[in-house]
Amino acid sequence: MGVADELHPGVAGGEAGGGQLLLGGGRPLDPGAHRHVGGDAALGGPLDRRPEVGTGRARLGGAEDQVHHPKLREVADRARLDRTEVVQLDAVLGRDGCRDRLPDLAPEAALDPVQDRRLVAGSVVCRWGRHLSPASIGLALAGGQRPPSVSLGGVSVATASASPSRASVKIPKDQVIVLFGATGDLAKRKLLPGMFHLSQVGLMPERFRIIGAARKGIEVAEFRELARESVQGSGRKTLDGGAWERFAGSLRFAAVGDGFEPLGEAIDAARGELGEEPEMLFYLSLPPGAASGTVEELGKLGIPKDARVLTEKPFGTDLDSARKLNALLNTVFDERRIYRIDHYLGREAVQNLLALRFANGMFEPVWNRNHIDHIQIDIPETLSIEMRGSFYEETGAFRDMVVTHLFQVLGFVAMEPPTSLEPKALGLEREKVFDSMSLLAPDDVVRGQYAGYRDEDGVADDSDTETFIAVKATVDNWRWEGVPFYLRSGKQLAQSKHLLTIAFRQPARRMFPLDCDQIVESFGHDHLSFELGDPGSISASFLAKVPGPTIELGEAHMQFSYADTFGGTDQALDPYERLIHDVMTGDRTLFTSSEAVERLWEISMPVLDDPPPVQSYEPGSWGPEASDQLILPRRWHLPSDHV
C-alpha cells in the first residue's frame, strides 16, 4: 500500500474560510500563493478552483480522500509543506495514533518555516511521547525547496547533504545496551542524559534495554533515580512524564564487583524481553586500566559474535598498552565492530571542516605550504581537574588531550581530499596524515602544572603530572613540508576556547608606506579562525585600508556564526549523542582504527619516555612562559577579542 493510500481523514481540511487544500503536481508550495481566507490552496500545483469547493477533499495525484483536520491544513500552510510532506506526515501521525493530538499553533503569523517544522516534529514526537519515525518526517520535510538546514526534534536534517549516507536519519534496530561505569561521572554528565534525549527525539531503537553495570551494586530503582537526577541536572532535557516513564522502564542494573554472572543473567533477561535477536552494544565508560579486565570477562560470557563495543579514550596509556588492549579486544570482538570514541569528532564544527574544505572551491587551492605559514589548535580551559585527581594522575594533559582530541583535529585539517565521504575513504586519508607525522621531540614540548594542583584530592604531594601541554608537530609530506602545527591545552587557564587558526603567509613584497609597518607587525598573519565549540563560528582577520585621504592600514574582521545562519543549533545533538547513535546504526565515519591509535602512540613515545620537566604556572594565566618561546617568532592567536 502506498503512502497516498494510507492517508487518513484529517490530512487537510477545507473548513478554514470555506476553501479547499489541493495536493497535486509536485511543485513546492509558493508561500505567497495561498491564504486562509475564502480561497483554495494548492500544494505543488497552481491555485485552482474545483467543483467540489467546500466539500473538504484533498486531491493526491488523482486519488481523493475525505479530510477533516483543520490543524494539519494550518501546519501545511504556515510551514509550507508540499504534497509529499503532508502525506508522509499524516501517514506517520495516523499510524501512531497522534493525528488528533496535533498542537495548537501560536496565533502569530510571523513564525518562520524552520520554527514551524520544529513545532510539528518536536511537539508530535516529544510532547505526546509517541515513538514516531523521525526518518519518515525528516525525509518528507527535507524535500523540495527548503532552507539549507532544518532541525527536527533535535535532529539536524540537511536538504543537500554532502554524503548520501547522511541524507536521512537512520533508526537503530532493537538493542540491548550494557553501560559499564554506569554510576560514574561521564555516565551521569553525558551518557544517561544523552540516551534519554535520543529516546525523546526518536533516535533510540523502537525497543531497547539499558543495563547499567558497576562494581558496587545498587537496586534498579536507585539506578533509575540516579538517571532521573542526571537528566534533570543536565539542564538540556525536559522530563515530560510519558517519555521519562518509557525510558526509565528500559533501565536495568547488574553489579559486577563479585563476578559477571549477574550481568549475564540480566543480558539474557533483556534479550528475552525484546525477542527476535536484538543487537548488543557494550559501552566501556572506564579508564584504560579497568577496560582490559572487563573485556576479558566479557569473553567468558559468550557474547554474540556480532556485538559492538564502544571504548572511551585514551585507548591505553602508551604504545605497549594500546597494542595489548587492541589485541585483547580482537579476541572478543570483530575489529569492524569496535568503536574507539573521541567525542571531539562528534562536534558539528569539527565535522564542518570537511564541508569547508571539500564542498567549496575557494579554500582548498590555498590549503598548503605555499600559502599557509603555520596552524594552531588551541583548547584552553578555565576549569580545574574538578575532583578527578585519581584519573588525571594516570593520564595528564598530554594523554588526555594531545594523543586524542588535538591529533584527531590535526588529521581533519591536514588530510588529502578523500575519494568519497564513506568511512573507509575518510579513515584512510586521516591515517595517511598520521603516518606522515614526525615523532615528537621532547624539545618541542612544554609541560606545565598549575599552582595548587598537588593540593587537589587524589593527587600525590610530589606529582609530576602535567595540567598544561604545548606541542610543535610536523607533517612530513608534500602539502605540509615546513608548516608547523602548534597544539596547546591546559587546565586553569585564562580563557576557555576550542580554537583552530590557519595563519597565512605574509605577502612576498610590502608595497605600503613604511609607517604601515607597525600595524603589520602588531597584527601578524592574516588568518582564518574556527571556533570548534558548538555551535561554532568561523572568522577571517586581515588588513584593510582605513577610510581617509591617506594610505593607512587597519585590522578588519568578518565572522560567520552557525547559530545566526542556520538557527536551531540549540536543538542539535550533543557530540556523545551523535556518536552513540552512529555506533547503534553501524556508522564508523567518526571513529578510529586500531592502526591509527597505535600510530599516534608511536608518535608520542619519545615524549613519554623522556618527558621534559614540569613548569609551574599561576591559575588564570596562559601557562608557562616557555610555551610562548616554543612558538617564536610567531605568537599564539589567543588571547584575542575577535573569536
Image (cartoon, helix red, strand yellow):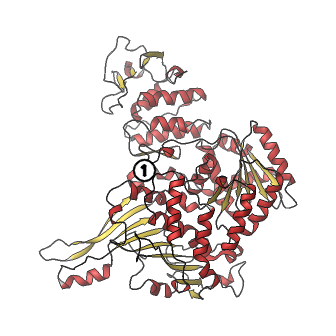
Please say if 281 is above or below 375: above
Q: Residue furthest left?
A: 549
- Name the residue: 33% across, 28% down: 34
Can residue 286 be spotted in the picture?
no
Q: Quadrant of residue 335?
A: bottom right
Residue 326 x, y percent position in the rendering: 69, 63
Can residue 57 be spotted in the picture?
yes
- Name the residue: 41% across, 72% down: 480
Image quarter hosting the N terminus: top right
Residue 26 x, y percent position in the rendering: 37, 27
Residue 627 x, y percent position in the rendering: 49, 84
Q: Is residue 27 left or right of residue 431?
A: left
Identify the element where label 1 is drawn: loop
Q: Nearer the viewer, residue 98 or 336?
A: 336
Q: Quadrant of residue 112?
A: top left
Residue tagged 1: 567
Residue type indicated by callout 1: Gly
Q: Is residue 188 left or right of residue 419?
A: right
Please say if 172 is above or below 322: above
- Name the residue: 62% across, 60% down: 341
Q: Nearer the viewer, residue 263 or 355?
A: 355
Image quarter hosting the C terminus: bottom left
Residue 157 x, y percent position in the rendering: 47, 44
> In this figure, what is the number of numbered marks?
1
